[in-house]
Each structure stands twice: as structure tokens, then as C-alpha cells.
Amino acid sequence: MRIYKCFRILGWDFTITPTRFVLTGFVFLMVATVLLRLLTGFQYVTNLTDETPWGLWIAFDVMCGVALAGGGYSTALLVSMFRYKQYGIVARGALLTSLLGYILVMAGLFLDIGQWFNFWRPFVSWGYTSVLFEVFWCISIYTTILSVEFFEIITERVLVKKLHKYVVKILPVLIVIGLVFPVLHQSSLGGLFLIMKEKMFPLWWSEFLPVYFLLSSFFIGSAMVAVETSLAKTAYGHEIPHDIMLSLTKVGARIMVVYLVMKLYDIITLDQWSYVFQGTLQSNMYCIEMLFGIIIPILIIFSPLGKKKWGLLTYAWLTVLGVILNRLNCVFTSMYESGAYFPGIGEFIVSIGLISMGVLIYCFLVENFNILGNERAVQIKIDKDKDIKNLIWSLLRTKRH
């Protein structure tokens, strides 16, 4: 990729490339759209109505975003609780991806609030009987925990290094707490649909929906780590040993097998085979979701194909896209009549802008902190930070005298 310019300000690096230039343009376009939405409401930005109140921001930015950010807690569970230390090499990358994912999820939630200036009310008005209240609090607390956990990486830089030892001391407590809240809100997102039995297409409604959402967030977590690692290799030359990635994804794949068995149990006990093969849009989308998002990935990962790099990457991408399709199907295909809703241009701009902003922040943090095992590069930056700090102190002393 051709480099346009590498900016360095006070020890911080950020490289401008054609791709990042385009992503920055999407971010500015998103900011303008967000301002229009905040000032005028939904009417000029979205196609939401009283009949179709859940749109792209809820289905993709929130439902899919929370699932895609599951790599952080699933990796932390394996590394910190079950002592699979070999996966520690991907822990920091997974933590960063999860943190950015949850920040973008909260942005999507904020924009989807009709009267956005009342976003603070759940903090003081406790609707403890509401599933949404529990989701709001869990996501808020977990995002805060992720931020403090990531602060341990931030404090490795010399400018705030004195705080590092204190952050390290509280990390074990934060990790334990951080393993509880994702389990709650991942399952609760599925619980939102339990009251919609009469509205949802039968193939997607089940009393096990909270369990389905929780299980899928776990196996998409390891798959997302594989995808993120592959992209990091392309951009930064960072490569994780194949046997480690294969072992990690197989842990998630075993959970996927449990998910598939439960789905088949639902179809058999509820006698839903007629819905599966009736040839309608809903049945066809369900078959695509199960075939390409669950069955084929399982066959790949537990066959000799999974031992090949392209096979593992194919498994990871199919799994990620399969869970995304599941979340979109739960909201749109199962509840809305065909043609009842299509996202407005403003909804697409905001979603694309949020993703673009997340990518840019990821690139900045990876280039300036030890995320991908780039200790040497970070040490060089730390040494330069010391030089800058000494220079500032020298100028201040000179000015005093």
C-alpha cells in the first residue's frame, strides 16, 4: 500500500494511506449525519416508523456489534480462568477489538434513542423489570471495565507510566467482573425476543433464544479473533502460529456443535420441518443461515481443511457472516413483511462511519502501543517520549530562569 504521509506529533505516529483517507471521509460524513439526526430527529435520516421501530442501527450496530465484540471476554475466559496461556498471544488484540466494538455499540444505542437528551435516565430511574434496563447497565459497566483493562496497556507509555503498577494490581478483579457481565447482556439480547412469539417467524423464535445468543457470541468471538489476526497480518505483518489459531477456533467450534444440536432439537420437538422447506423468503434465509453459517463451518474446521490457513480463514469468515445474518434475520426477516422497511441512506452512512472510525482508532493504537507484540517499536517510542519530556522540562526551567 502506498504511503502518503506519516504524521508524528509529540511522539505519536499515524500513517495516512489512501484507504485511511477514504475512511476519514466516511467519518466526517457520519459526523454531519449524526448532527442532523440529533437536531431534527429520525425523519430526515432514517426510514424508521411505528410499525418498523427497529432498524439498521439496532440490528447491525447493536445486535451484531455486541456479538462481534465477544472475542474479548471469550479469550479472557480461556486465558485467565481456564489457564490456556498459549492463547495469551492474541489476548491484547482481542481486548482492543472488543473495547472498540462496545464503544461503537453504545454510540449506536445512543443514536437510536428517540429523545437522545434523556440518555442518562436509566442511571437514576431503575426499571429493574425491563430486559433493556439490564442490557443498558451491563453494556455500560462492561465497557467501563474494558476501558480500565486497556488502560494497563496505555500506562506502559512513559507519560503515564507511574499509574501502571496500580492498574496491574486491580486487573485480576476486573477480569473476574468482566467475565460476568457479558454473559448477562449477551443472553439478555436474545431474551428481548421472547415476548415476540406471535410476531416472529417460528424458525427463529425459541424459548432457548437467550442461550442461542450467548453460545453464538462465544464461537463468533474466536472466529473474530482469527479474522482480526488475518487483517493485522496483511496490514502490519503480525502473524499468530497456525496451530494456536486452530486450537482457539476449535474451542469455539465445539460450542457451535452444541448450538446446532439445540437448533435441531427445537425443529424436531416443535415439528417445524414444514417451515424449513416451504420455499418462502423466511425459510430460504433460515436455510442459508444454517448451512453457510453453521453446518459448513463445522465441516471445515473438523476436517483436514481446517489445518490449512485458507481453510481456517474460510471457517472464520463464514462463522462471522453467519452470526451477522442470524441477528439481521431475527430483526428483519422474522418480524417485518418483505418490503416493509429498508434502511435510509443516513442509516448506512452512520453505520459505515462508525466502522471506519473504529478501524482508524485501531490503527492508531496498534502503531503506538504494544498490542500485537511490537515491544521493540513501542520501546523506541517510549525512549522518544522521554526525550520529549526532558525537552519540555528543560524549556520550562529555562523560562523560569
Image (cartoon, rainbow, N blue to C red):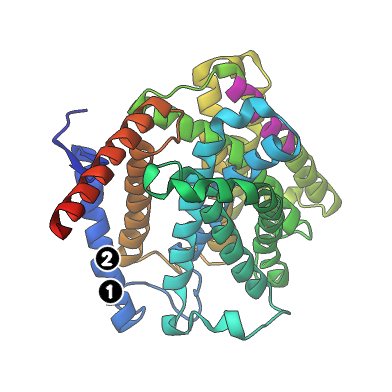
Three-letter code for the amino acid on which mark 2 is drawn: Val
Residue 231 counted in the magenta span: no
Q: Give the side of residue 386 with respect to residue 127, left or right.
A: left
Give the SS element for disc 1: helix
Q: Which residues are magenta?
A: 244-255
Verify CB contact (< 8 Å) between mark 1 and mark 2: yes
Q: Which residue is rendered at x = 47% and y = 48% of the image?
A: 162
Pick the residue in front: 206 or 258: 258
Q: Which residue is rendered at x = 71% and y = 60% of the image?
A: 184
* Numbered label tally: 2
313 in relation to 28, above or below: above
Pick the residue in front: 228 or 361: 361
Circle 2 Cα neighbour tier, 10 Å, few/some/many (<14 / 14–19 / ≥20): some
Q: Give the side of residue 44 with respect to residue 79, left or right.
A: left
Q: Give the side of residue 220 with respect to residue 181, left or right.
A: left
Quadrant of the rendered structure where residue 81 is?
top right
**From the image, which quarter does the C terminus lie in?**
bottom left
Residue receiving disc 1: 35
Q: Position of residue 167 (x, y in %)?
A: 56, 50
Give the SS element for disc 2: helix
330 in relation to 291, above or below: below
Q: Which residue is rendered at x = 44% and y = 68% of the image?
A: 341
Residue receiving disc 2: 31
Q: Which residue is rendered at x = 53% and y = 31% of the image?
A: 226
The main secondary structure of the magenta stretch is helix
Residue 252 counted in the magenta span: yes
Quadrant of the rendered structure where residue 71 is?
top right
Three-letter code for the amino acid on which mark 1 is drawn: Leu
Task: Confirm whether residue 318 shows in the render.
Answer: no
Q: Position of residue 232 (x, y in %)?
A: 40, 31
